[in-house]
Image (tube, rainbow, N blue to C red):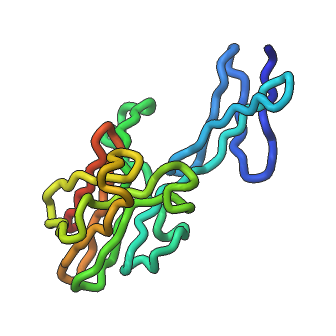
Amino acid sequence: NEVTVSDAEGTETVTDAGGNMQVVVAKSTTYKFEVSYATADPVVTVSEAPIYLRGGFTDWGASETNQLGFMAMDDANTAEASHIYSLEVDYPGGASSFKIADEGWGGTLGYNYGTAADDVQLELGVPLTLYSANSDESIGDSKNINVTLDAGTYIFAFEDGVTKIMTVTSK
């Protein structure tokens, strides 16, 4: 079957690269690839699907300022897929909590990651395994990630591998 490429507003351009589909993006974020079989000719759509650092120090919102960006681990490898996303945060100091989530708190892409228990505290420089109801039904909804830091600039890094890992380091 032939495939139709969507050119709807808010979607990325998909081109033919010698029989393969090619997407060139300008923004360092996550993308959603969809194929609709609602008609005889399937329709391919590629659109932004950002993941956010949503917490007390970021207004719990899904705004561009809270959006995690792809963090390249090997600048020489243009095809790299490290699956690490990060955000530089000017942290006001003190205790707060947050989660890693998509715009719909898991309803958009299935991203609503936190901890398995209410009393888990993230420590500076120590990787913390995250959970969601999708990854472990026994915990139900994930709990907020608690953090207490001095005022300063920090890198919040989310590793989106088989195991979901959160690490915060000072800049």
Q: Is residue 153 left or right of residue 113?
A: left
Front one among 94 and 135 = 135
Front one among 103 and 141 = 141
Q: Is residue 118 left or right of residue 64?
A: left
Q: x, y percentage for residue 131?
A: 31, 52
Residue visible at 49% across and 70% down in the picture: 65
Residue visible at 30% across and 62% down in the picture: 156
Q: x, y percentage for residue 140?
A: 36, 57
Indicate the quadrant where residue 74 lies: top left
Residue visible at 41% across and 65% down in the picture: 53
Residue visible at 23% across and 82% down in the picture: 95
Q: Is residue 117 above or below residue 29?
A: below
Q: Is residue 38 above or below residue 27?
A: above
Q: Quadrant of the N terminus?
A: top right
Which residue is situated farthest in the right direction here? Answer: 40
Front one among 73 and 100 = 100
Indicate the quadrant where residue 115 lies: bottom left
Which residue is situated farthest in the front direction here? Answer: 138
Q: Is residue 58 left or right of residue 14?
A: left
Q: x, y percentage for residue 34?
A: 66, 36
Front one among 78 and 134 = 134
Q: Is residue 124 above or below residue 3?
A: below
Q: x, y percentage for residue 50?
A: 53, 55
* Number of numbered discs: 0
Q: Is residue 39 above or below residue 29?
A: above
Q: Quadrant of the C terminus?
A: bottom left
